Structures are given as structure tokens and as C-alpha cells.
Amino acid sequence: MDTSQDFKSLQDKIQAALVATTRTVNQIANEDLSFLRTANPTNGDRLDEHSSRLLSLATEVLNAAANANGQKPITELEDVEDTDIQWSGIVDVIDGLLEKADISLDEYTGRVKRKHDFPEAAAPSKKAKTNDRNEINWRRANIMKPQNAFEQKFNNFTTAPWKPILTTKPHASVPLEESLRIIIDENGQEQYTHPYEPEITKLEYSPTTYAVRDPIPYQPIESTAPIWVDTYEGVLEMLEELKQATEIAVDLEHHDLRTYTGLLSLMQISTREKDWVIDTLRPWRHKLEVLNEVFADPKILKVFHGAFMDIIWLQRDLGLYIVGLFDTFHASSALEFPQKSLAYLLKTFVDFNADKRYQMADWRIRPLTDEMLYYARCDTHYLLYVYDVIRNELVKNSDSSSPEKNLIEYTLERSKETSLDRYTYWVPDSATGEGGRGWANSLLKTSIRLDGSQFAVYRAIHSWRDTLARTEDESPMFIMPPTVLMDISRLLPSDPKALWSLLGGKCAAIVPQKLDELFDLIVKAKETGVNGPSSTQFFRTGTLDNSMAAVAQREFGQKEKVEPDLPPVQELRSQQSQLFGPIPVSSRWEQAAAPLQDANGQLIPLPWTSFVQEAAVSAAHQEAEAKALQKQRAADMIPLVDPAPAPAPAKQEPIVEDNEFTLRQGRKRKLDKVQPSDDSDDDDEEEEDDDDDEGGAAVESQDMIMLNEDGEDPAARKARKRAEKKARKVAVRAMKAEAKRGRGAARRKAAAENGDDEQPFDYSTAQSVLHAQRVAANEVVVPKGKKAFDPYAARMSAEGPKPARRMHGERPGKTATFRK
């Protein structure tokens, strides 16, 4: 049988089985499994049997894939928790399969060449060799720690102020003994002063720094080779040549993963003619202090790029200080370059592409690869030429008359400030989380909020990790990454096996060895944090210096906002309303009691307080006040008009029959003049009724203003007015009805006298309907005595028919076609 056909049938069989299994599993919810096990024990046995079979098949498939890819096989998966524990290994196997599938697809489509397409005699490329070597040595290279062989070791547990390690002070204007004194820094901590602070502060740069000069071309990198310096004799030979230079370029390579404080692993120094690469991991590294004869010489300009950390590393590890610094990073900021990295400067001015993959390499490995050595020397080989170009740009764009526009002076001042930085110990406070490598800054940068127990566990593990890192001389990041620390704090594992699954092979090897110790710490912290504050409550408290504003001030140098002095509350009060002015809104407010105030007079009265106070008055008291007020008003009233005479008794009107009428029928105003009818009478009647109503309302309003001198009851007076108004309306309607009947009789009498009665229809002379005469389609039947209507007569003239009138023309604007 064909191999492809055999694989096709096997693939279809496996795929069909997987699809059927998946469909069956999806029919049962995970939440129902416990109920099914309880309802029928047989279901539990079958579920366990099928789960074991699936895990066994998954183990066989994963091990087969691992063997095919040359990876480490995984152990037997017995339950779901084993899957969590070995999840990283499972992911590695699956990633290997996917990567292999991608490579096969690329080879099949022709995007990359197959391996057998390359000539066998061809030498491997440097890039491939570099990647293979770096994959082994980067970040977690399993090598001996070079710090263990140092003659002067670093103390990770000291809490005293860090004292500079230099023993001599070349080019000093103040002796070393007088330069080292203890001061209190801005954080309230004791620190030693900078040994070269007087020399750096009073430094005056060479006049050549302020002049425009032609850039000195760099030496071809192919024709020169770097000088490797790993002996003290070699350092002294290099020092003699450096003393003859006027500018040097310096760069450093640092490692901070497999040590607590960090390691200065490599130093590169370049002049106009030569490049040196110094091994700073030698046991006698403290003797490199002799380089201060050049580094502290104010006559020699030291060119760095981004020296804010290089200055710290040189002080801490080698006791070296820079006097006469020119930082091209500050120059890039002054010139407002779009990017300020060294790679951008090399690409812009030299057209050199720096391979920054080696920036995170493990620079502790010895010997260095050719590619790593090439990368190290290129950073300083071109830097002096870049300095020449940037210096000319700074001088050309500077205005010495304006401090804000003097770019060269700005760059030099910022460089002085950078060289004055001092190294201090990392001393985190476990209670407040402040200090170097404290938990407060890292927790504030995340959006996760922890409750009391989680917050206590986070602080306890953070402190435990820091102590373990100091003991093992490893970085806290290497001991336990922040993601694992946060996962443990959020999930709070209930047993050591769950804690093991959270570690996931991402921590140092010593952490699983201390698994029981770590779990006991979590249990104790969880119990003590039940009644403790959450992370949000902790950062909201103002008793500790850990607020967001304090952290921002420490990190970014922001000044605290000074609250303005507010005037007293009494000065902000107004005695009258800005809306109503001096006019009181209600007389009741004027009689209200004084507003309530506390001892300091900080309460401002509101209008509704008077109503609340008056609500306590009894109903009887309110009624008595109302009667007294009514009597007072009656005594003070003055008649405005004469009282109306007593109405005459209403006469009995004849019975009026109901007639049709229209309520405000809409019509044109010209209709009354052209075609009078009975409807107009009805409208007139309505209008008169309305006028009568308005008149009655006016009279009534006048009556309401009149004073009630005879003591008539208001209800009886209102009923009498209604009766008089109704009587007047009935009389008016009767008069209108009589006038309307008179007009109808007059019209009928006039029609009879004129003889305009219609003649009856004569059927004898009418045309037969069944035998009517046929009329042509185009013939127009015109009744006798009438002229036929010609629709074209108006459009005819002596010359012929008139042209059609112009219709709506085109309008200016855009035109468009709408399509479906």
C-alpha cells in the first residue's frame, strides 16, 4: 500500500476518534461530574477509567513527540494535578511540534531552503554560530561564580552607609580624608560624600570643547584589532598610552542576574588609534583603581553614552570616578533627536547597525566569542567620531547670550550632575516596602489589588525571597520572578503540591528544596493577614510615607503641591442672595428663628431649615393665627370699585328648541363676504357667546376685587354670579334663534316671488340609454348652448404653438449616482 494512503487512513481514523470523544465530553458540564458520581457510583468508576485512559494516551503521544524532537520525556500523568505540575514540559513539547511544522511548511512553500540544499563544504555562518552559543550561555549560564574568587568580596547584609573603596585620590584639590565625611541625604539616610565633588563642581572644560572643528575620521574597524587586557601589567601599559590622549571613549558591560549587587563584567576604552577590552572579573579587579589617573584627570575628556548607571558601577566595583564627562545622551536630548540611543547615533552618523541582541548577553563567560568581542569594541570605536559631529552641532545651535539656548553648556552641566551620582546600599523596609528593591514600588505599578490575607502573603514572600537572594548571592528576580510571586499571593495554594505547580520550573533550583519552609510561611502569613489591611487600604493611609504622591516624588523628583491659604469661612458668607438681592423670597423666612450653628460657627443656614422648624407648630396654633390674620386683613381693606347693585329677578324665557350648530368651523376670512350662509350665523353666535363669557369674566373679576361689606357668604355670591351668567346666555341664544328663523322665511319668500323653482325632468325627450348613438373616440361631445373646451388654445399663437415653459434647471453642487 502507498505510504501516503496509509497515513491518510490513519489520520482520518484518529481524527474521527478525537472528534467523537470531544463531542461526547462537551455534552457533560464539569460542574455536573460530582452530582453524577453521587447519583450513581458506577458513573464515578467509568469516569475514572476513561480519565486514566486519556491521560495515558496523552503521555504516550507527548513522549513520542519529545523523542522525535530530541527533548526530555515527561513522566507519567496520573491525575489532573500532574498536568499542572508538568505544564511547562508539556508546553515545550507542543511548541517543538509547532515549530517543526512551521519549518516544514516554509520548506514546502519555498520560503526557506532545505538543509540538504546547502553545500556540505560551506562554512557555518557567524550568525548561526552566535545564536547557538548564546542560547547556551545567555542569562542562565551554568558557570562558576566569578565573585567567589574576588580578593575583596561584597557584603550583602551590611546596613551601614556605603563607604567609597578608593585608597588614593589622584588629581585632588581636596585630600581624600577631608573628602570622605558622612552627611544626611534627601531621604534622611546617612551617606558618605562624593570624593571628587569639589573637583567636579569647579571643573572648567577645555576651550576645544566649545569650538567647531572638523571631525577626525575613525580607523577602519577591519584593519584594527581590539587589545584584550586581563593582566595587571597589561593595565599599566594601557594606562601609559591613555595618558597621552585628550579624549577617550568608555563603555561598560554589566551582569545582574546571578549576583545580588551586580557585576561589572567588561570595560571598553578607545582612543583615536586603539581599542582596549579589559576583563573586570579578575580576582585583582580592585587594582583597577589605578585608572583614576586618567579618569579623574580634568584635562582628558571622557565620552560616555547614557552614563547614569556606568558611574554607579565604576564606583561600586572598581573605585573609579569620572572628572570631565561628556555624555552624548544629554547632547541628543539638547538637540531634540527623535531617538537618543547609541544605536540610533551610530546608524545616523556612521551608518553602522549595532546588533543589540548582545546587550542582554551573559558577559561573565570566558573566553568571549568573536561576535561578542566585536560588539563590545564597536560601541567605543565610533563614539569619538560621533562626539565630534554632535559637539559641532551643539556649538552651531548655541546662543551664549541666552542660558536657555546655550546647548553646549546645558550638555556639560547635565554631564557634571551625572558624574556626581553616588552608590548606596539596597536596604528595603519590610514593613513599609520602601527603599531599594522594596515591595511598595513593584506593587504600585500593578493593577492587581490584594485583600488582607493576600497582601500579608505577598509581603512575607517578598521578604523571604530577598533574604534568600542575599544568602545565595543571587538576584531576587532569579530566585523567584515577580509573576510567580504575584500568582502565589493571589491564589493562596492550599497544599504543597499546589504550591509546586505554581512554581512551574520558573524559580531557582533552591526554591523547590525549601518548599515546606515556603508553604509554612504562607500559612502563617495568611492567618495573620485575615484582620489586616488590604493593599488598597494600606496605600490610602497617610501615616506612612508610601502614598502615590510620595512614590512619584521619589521616582520622578516631583515637588509636593503646596495648598493655598484659604480665607476664614466667615469671610466667604454673603448676607444677601446674589439671585434675589435685598428682596426676601418669603415673609415666612424673615420670621424664622436664627440658624443653628456649632461652637465654631461653621454651619451655613439653608432656606429649608425654617420650614423644618415651623413644622413643629401645632395645627390648632396655625388655625388661630390664620383667623387672626384674616380679621386683620378685612379691617385694613379699602373698596376699589363701587359695589354692584342687586341683580333683578330673572324673567321666564320661552322654551328654545335645539338647533344644529358648529363649534369653530375652520374657514377662510373672505368666505363671509363672498358667500354668507347659516354657518356664519352660528359662528357669530359663538363669537358673541365668547365675548359674553369674557365680559362676564371681567365683571366677575371686578366683583372679586370689591370688598365684601354686606357680609355675604363667598359661596352664595359665587352661585349667584353663575346663575346670572347662565340666564344671560340663554336670552342671547333665544334672540339669535328667532333672528335666524326670520332670515330663513325671508329667503323662501323671495324665491317664490322670482319663480326660480326647478322644472321637472322630461323623460319623453331624453335620449335612449340602450340605443344611444356611438361617438368616436376622438370626438368631443359638446352640450348644446356651450362652447367646447380646447386645452391647447392658450398655447397657440400666430406663428404656431408656444414653446414649453422652462422647468427647474440644473442646480449647482455635486452630483452622485446611488447604487444598490
Image (cartoon, helix red, strand yellow):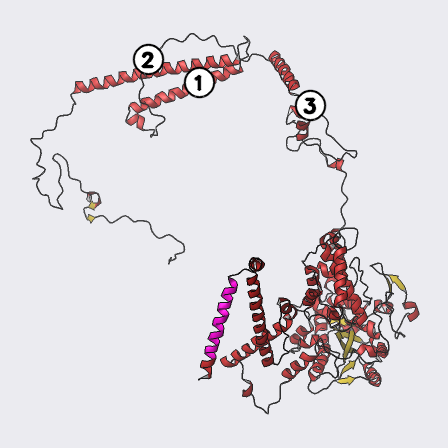
| Foreground: disc 3 or disc 1 | 3
Q: In the image, what residue type sits under mark 2?
A: Ile
Q: Is residue 49 visible?
A: yes
Which numbered disc flags the more N-terminal residue, 1 or 2? 2
Looking at this view, is 532 or 305 the one in front?
532
Label 2 sits on a secondary structure element that is loop
Label of residue 655 in the image:
2
Q: Is residue 645 left or right of residue 759?
A: right
Q: In the image, what residue type sits under mark 3?
A: Gln
Q: Quadrant of the C terminus?
A: bottom left
Q: Is residue 794 above or below residue 250?
A: above
Residue, disc 1: 695
Label of residue 252 in the image:
none
Residue, disc 3: 591
Q: Residue at x 15, y 25 (%)?
A: 758
Which numbered disc flags the more N-terminal residue, 3 or 2? 3
- The magenta stretch spans which residues? 7-26
Q: In the image, what residue type sits under mark 1?
A: Gly
Q: Crowding at label 2, few (<14), some or many (≥20) Cα neighbours within 10 Å?
A: few
Label 1 sits on a secondary structure element that is helix
Q: Crowding at label 3, few (<14), some or many (≥20) Cα neighbours within 10 Å?
A: few
Looking at this view, is 524 or 197 the one in front?
524
